[in-house]
Each structure stands twice: as C-alpha cells, then as structure tokens.
Image (cartoon, rainbow, N blue to C red):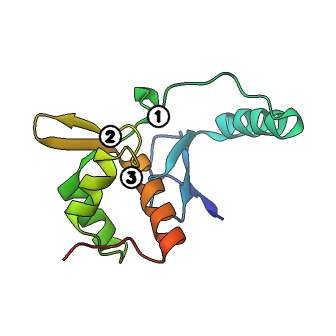
Amino acid sequence: MVKFTLHQIGNQDPDDKWRGYAIMPDDGTGGFLVGDTASIHALAKRLNRFLENERHDGKIPSLDERLGWQWMSIAQAVEFARDQNIPIAASTIRMACTSKKISDAKLEGKTWRFPRATFMGWLKRSTHQRGRPKQRE
C-alpha cells in the first residue's frame, strides 16, 4: 500500500505569505501540488464524499494531459527501472509494448513511448507476479 506524506512547500520570498502544500507518495512517483490550506479542506471534503458513496465525477482518458503524465522511451524506462533496483532488458519492455501489455504504448517512428505511470504499473505487476521480469540473454 502506498503511503502519503504532506509537506509545506518552501518559500524563498519571506514577504510572500502564500503557503502551499504537496502530497508525496512513497512509491517513486511524482508528488501532487495541493495548494493552500483552503484547497486542502476542499480536497478533503471531496475525498470524504467519494469515500461515503464511491461516486466520482466521471471518467477521463488515461492520456488526458491534465493528469500530467510524463512520456518515456524504452531507454528511459530501462534507466528508471535500474534506479528502482529492478534490472530489465530493453527487449523485454519492447515485447511488452508490442503485445500491448504496457497499455497506451505508442510507436512513434521507430521509438516506443508510453506514460511513465503506465510503465510503473506494468513494472510493478510484472515484478510482483513473476518475482522479477524475465530478461533475454
């Protein structure tokens, strides 16, 4: 289970009274800028409503730019996985793109690209289901 921490964003200007906050997950993904205290209260109110009735405000596509997905290439994915201490071959990722196991992967010319969050989900599932993703020799 992902754990979240709440942090005040450091303000370099002592005259600026705005105090923003960010939520940071411990799974290596990016944090979320929440805003000021009033924004946190509004978010808490909306999350509590969701927890009461599990109703959301509608579906959005996984590639919606408002989600702030960071697109990765296979080379960037290999480096990211290595930083997470999960060695994986580029050929393994390429096969996962080709077989649509990494959803939303798009071939742009000769380069596969996919959202970072999608890759992270695939990597986590692959690692969990099989111990470690298999590598080709």
Marks 1 and 2 close (CB-CB < 8 Å): no
The residue sitting at 11% across, 34% down in the picture is: 109
Element under label 2?
loop
Q: Which mark is residue 119?
A: 3
Residue that lies at the very extreme toward the left in this rendered image? 110
Residue type marked 2: Ala
Q: Which of disc 1 and disc 3 is earlier in sequence?
A: 1
Give the percent coordinates (x, y) of residue 95: 28, 54
Q: Sort mark 1 into few (<14), some (14-19) or many (20+) by Cα contacts within 10 Å.
A: few
Closer to the camera, 120 or 28? 120
Q: Looking at the rendering, which quadrant does residue 122 occupy?
A: bottom left
Q: Which of disc 3 and disc 2 is earlier in sequence?
A: 2
Element under label 1?
helix
Quadrant of the rendering where the C terminus is positioned:
bottom left
Between circles 2 and 3, the one closer to the viewer is 2
Q: Sort mark 2 into few (<14), some (14-19) or many (20+) by Cα contacts within 10 Å.
A: many
Between circles 1 and 2, the one closer to the viewer is 2
Look at mark 2 in the image and give the residue it sits on.
105
Give the percent coordinates (x, y) of residue 70: 33, 43
Q: Is residue 75 left or right of residue 27?
A: left
Q: Which mark is residue 67?
A: 1
Label 3 to label 1: alpha-carbon separation: 15 Å
Closer to the camera, 30 or 82? 82
Between circles 3 and 1, the one closer to the viewer is 3
Q: Is residue 3 left or right of residue 126?
A: right
Residue type marked 3: Phe
